[in-house]
Image (cartoon, rainbow, N blue to C red):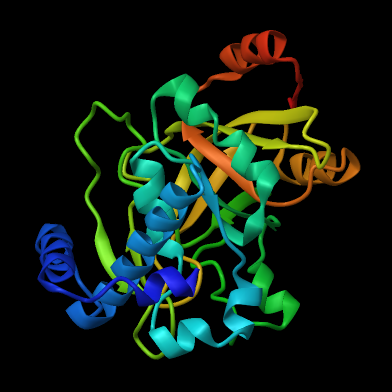
Amino acid sequence: MFNYFDEIPADEGIHQEARALIEGADKVDITEEYLCSDLRYFHAARKMMERYDCNAFTTPCKELCASLLPQKNKCVPCITHSLNKDDRIPSACEEDLTVWMAMMMMYLTRRSVFMGNPVLVPAGSKTLEQLGMPRLLTQPGRVFDHDVLEIHHAVPVRRMRGFDQPEQRYELTHFTTQGWGAHYHVDMAEEEGQVVTFGRFNRQGTKMMVAVGHTLGCEFRPVYCSPAVYYEVEGGAREFRQALAKGGYGHHQAIIYGNYVKELQELGEIVGFEVEVFR
C-alpha cells in the first residue's frame, strides 16, 4: 500500500482537495499539511484498487500501526474509509470482511453506512471507568437508566440520509495525540430517535444478523475512535450483544438509517444467505 502512497505527491491538486474539505467543515482541528497526508493515502488506496480491479477496500489497523508506517507518513486510513463509503464503495476497518459484506446495505438502501465497535453501557454506569482504561479510552459522558449500546469508530459518513440527499455537516479532527491522522466528526444524533438497522455476517459468510434500534445521543471525543453514538436496541442492548457472541457473529456492526429488515430478508432469499432477526 505504501508503495502506492510514495507515488502520490502532495501537489497542488492534493492541497486543493484538502482546502475544500477544510472550507466546508464547521470546525477544523488538523493542519492542511497533515490532511494532505491522509488524502495521499486515499488516492494510494484508489490507485491500488484500480490496479487490481477492486470494488471494495479494507486494511489492518493495529498491525498497520505496529509497522510504524502511519507514524512515519503521518496518516491513518480513517478518512479514506469515510470517503469511499460516501462514494458507494464498501470500506471496512481492521480487515473485517464480515462487516464489509454487510455494507451491501448501501446498495439496497442507497444510503451510506457507519461502522464501529459495539460496547455495552450498563444501566447506571460509566463502563470504561470500571474497566480501568480511562487513559486509553474516553468514558461515556452520560449515565443511562437502562442498558444501551455505544458504537464508536473514526469512520462516520456524510450521506447516511441518502446518496441523493444533501450531505450532513461535519468537523475535521485528528486521531492521534500528536495531532495527525484526519477523520470526520458527524453528529449522528442530530435527529432525535433516528431509526437505524444494525447488520453483520457470521464468520462463514452464510448468515446475517440484523436488528433495529434508534439513536439516543452522539459524542465527539478528542482522539482515538470517535464519534461515539448511543443506541437503543429493540430486544435489549445486552441481549443483542449476547446473541452476537452466541451466534458466532463477532464484533463490528454496520449501521444504516431506517428499518430495512424486510428488504434484507428478501435480499437473502434472492442471493442465498440466511437472515437472523434479533428482537
Residue at the (13%, 65%) spot, across then down: 13
Seen in the picture, residue 31 relative to 188 is either above or below; the reply is below
Seen in the picture, residue 226 relative to 108 is either above or below; the reply is below
Q: Can residue 146 be seen here?
A: no
Residue 78's x, y, as percent?
44, 63
Q: In the image shown, does 231 or 211 lie closer to the viewer?
A: 211
Q: Can residue 225 be seen here?
A: yes
Across the whole image, how many numbered discs are drawn on residues?
Answer: 0
Residue 53's x, y, as percent?
48, 42
Q: In the image shown, does 141 or 255 lie closer to the viewer?
A: 255
Residue at the (53%, 39%) spot, across then down: 255
- State which quadrant residue 23 falls in: bottom left
Seen in the picture, residue 138 relative to 122 is either above or below; the reply is below
Residue at the (14%, 71%) spot, across then down: 15
Quadrant of the frame with the C terminus:
top right
In this picture, residue 15 sits left or right of residue 126: left
In this picture, residue 130 sits left or right of residue 79: right
Q: In the image shown, does 31 or 244 lie closer to the viewer?
A: 31
Seen in the picture, residue 136 relative to 147 is either above or below; the reply is below
